[in-house]
Amino acid sequence: MMLVEIGQAMWGSAARAVAAIALAPSPGPDPGTTLNTDGIVKFFTTKIVPILLAALGVIFIGRASKGEVSRVLTSSAIAIIGLAFVAGAASLFFFGDSLVSLIFTK
């Protein structure tokens, strides 16, 4: 008998919880919390990338002045290949939709 009473009490609580969840409003996107991705990309391209390239240039000049020209050439080649990959990724970021529609549409 006690088990039946516990079951009925739990059933009543569960029914009230389900009803409360069903009547709760669904969350929607808050218009004030959007992320300005264009501003972030512009900030990185105008502020961060030139600083990193200047740091690489200083490192390369410092190594070349110490006589490590082969290491400078190797590092320069690696940096140029890395920049080519970044440029390729950026071009896919901007032109990827048109490339996909060009390839996969009839």
Image: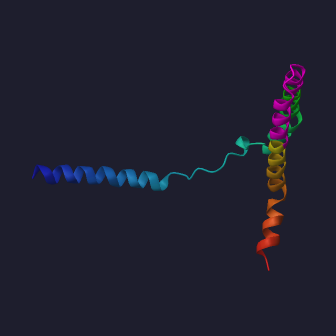
Give the image location of residue 48, x and y in percent.
83, 32
Image position of 102 with respect to 92: above or below: below
User: How many numbered callouts?
Assistant: 0
| Viewer-closest of 67 and 37 | 67
Residue appearing at x 68%, y 45% in the figure? 30
Q: Quadrant of the C terminus?
A: bottom right
Query: Is residue 75 rendered magenta in the image?
Result: yes
* Residue visible at 74% across and 42% down in the picture: 35
Q: Which residues are magenta?
A: 58-80
Q: Residue furthest left?
A: 1
* 53 is higher (above) or lower (below) than 29: above
Q: Position of residue 4 (x, y in %)?
A: 15, 54
Depth check: give the residue in front, 78 or 17: 78
Image vertical order of residue 25 relative to residue 83, above or below: below
Quarter assignment of residue 82: top right
Colour logic: rainbow
Q: Is residue 39 visible?
A: no
On the image, the x and y values in percent for residue 50 come to 88, 32
Position of 28 with respect to 89 (left or right) is left
Q: Who is closer to the viewer here, 104 or 75? A: 75
Q: Is residue 42 magenta?
A: no
Residue located at (41% from left, 55% from top): 19
Q: Tell me residue 77's x, y (percent).
A: 84, 40
Residue under the image location 86 percent in, 38 percent down: 45
Q: Is residue 11 visible?
A: yes
Query: Furthest-bottom residue in view?
Result: 106
